[in-house]
């Protein structure tokens, strides 16, 4: 059902057992039976300056190497479920077990004044991991996908809608006048607002551009860049609520004076999860000394899949996670 590989204690499970699979980046409660995870996985609570708890403490599941094998996730016996809980294969027990997604603390320079939550009229930038998409891979077999490098930075969204300019991080709508925030500062330096207004005037539709901010002060500057940079991965036609076609998006990014994420060619999809994970290995196009974070695959035109929604997904390079996944 899922395409993850997990190393478990010998004898803990036998073929045919039902288990609870806990995905990487899950934050588990501090159960006594999970104390063996404390040394490498415990994370303290994330709080505001006033002591408000934004994310409770717990055990964060991450990619590790055990007995020479990459292990991604944790398998638990179904006896961890409360009495009477459903145990059918495929049941989501996230809430029953009080599991939440781990979100690292906001780095210094990326906090600041906000206007509100991420706006609903712009698509969120998270991609689905390929390991949960075996049915999608089977259904889309034979299709041609564009492949780009997934960069490790911080998410940047700028939009122009009904004459209003806005800037967003991954989850928040920012106050674009707060130049203490790195996203707002680079938007001003690159004149993103006037360029978006010119693009809107020329193209005739409200537009959003989504990019990865990389460089000094961002995620340890994995790519050893001298200056901060934006690399575009989405251009959105807000009037239609759809992504602009792949080739045209590259042209529009160029018209904005911005580069795109590194293109890595096209792929005729005839791969299972393991084969795609193997393809994700390799150095970054931005710095040969840095393993790339992974790949993003999507067709040339924005379309939907019955299970996935927007047909676009990511394949993360385990070597990258083993080297950098310590947040």
Image: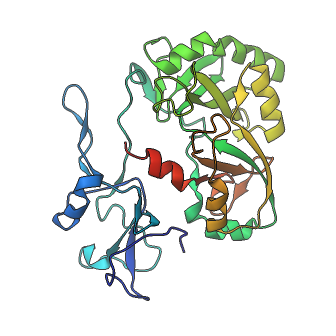
Task: Report the residue at 44% width, 67% height from top.
Answer: 68
Nearest the eye: 109 or 85: 109
Can residue 245 be seen by looking at this rendering?
no
Judge left or right: residue 300 versus residue 178.
right
Q: Vertically, is 117 above or below 83?
A: above
From the viewer's perspective, tell me whether residue 143 is left or right of residue 181. Answer: right
In this orientation, does residue 224 appear? yes
User: Residue 305 at x, y = what percent?
Assistant: 69, 59
Q: Residue at x 43, y 88 (%)?
A: 15
The image shows residue 41 at horizontal and vertical percentages of 29, 53
Q: Identify the image quadrant of the C terminus.
A: top left
Q: Quadrant of residue 199?
A: top right
Image spot of residue 165 (x, y percent): 60, 18
Residue drawn at x 24%, y 73% as measured from the top left = 82
Spot occupied by residue 75 in the image (x, y as percentages of width and height): 37, 71
Depicted 271 relative to depicted 153: above or below: below
């Amino acid at each position: 059902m899922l395409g993850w590989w997990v190393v478990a204690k010998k004898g803990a499970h036998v073929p045919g057992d039902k288990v609870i699979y806990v995905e990487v980046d899950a934050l588990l409660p501090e159960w006594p039976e999970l104390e063996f995870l404390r040394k490498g996985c415990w994370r303290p609570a994330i709080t505001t300056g006033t002591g408000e708890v934004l994310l409770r403490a717990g055990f964060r599941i991450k990619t590790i190497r055990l007995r020479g094998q990459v292990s991604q996730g944790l398998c638990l016996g179904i006896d961890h479920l409360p009495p009477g809980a459903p145990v059918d294969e495929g049941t989501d027990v996230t809430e029953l077990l009080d599991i939440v997604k781990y979100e690292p603390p906001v780095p210094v320079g990326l906090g600041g004044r906000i206007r509100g939550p991420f706006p609903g009229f712009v698509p969120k930038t998270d991609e689905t991991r390929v390991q949960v998409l075996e049915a999608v891979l089977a259904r889309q077999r034979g299709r041609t996908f564009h492949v780009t490098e997934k960069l490790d930075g911080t998410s940047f969204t700028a939009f122009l809608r009904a004459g209003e300019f806005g800037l967003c991080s991954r989850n928040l709508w920012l106050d674009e006048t707060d130049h203490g925030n790195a996203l707002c500062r680079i938007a001003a330096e690159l004149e993103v607002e006037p360029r978006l207004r010119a693009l809107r005037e020329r193209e005739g539709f409200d537009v959003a551009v989504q990019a990865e901010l990389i460089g000094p002060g961002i995620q340890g500057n994995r790519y050893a860049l001298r200056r901060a940079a934006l690399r575009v991965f989405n251009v959105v036609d807000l009037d239609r609520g759809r992504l602009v076609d792949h080739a045209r998006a590259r042209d529009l990014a160029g018209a904005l004076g911005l580069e795109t994420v590194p293109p890595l060619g096209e792929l005729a999809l005839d791969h299972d999860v393991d084969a795609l994970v193997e393809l994700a290995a390799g150095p970054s196009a931005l710095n040969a000394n840095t393993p790339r974070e992974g790949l993003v695959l999507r067709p040339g035109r924005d379309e939907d899949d019955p299970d996935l929604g927007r047909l676009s997904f990511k394949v993360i390079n385990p070597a990258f996670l083993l080297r950098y996944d310590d947040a």
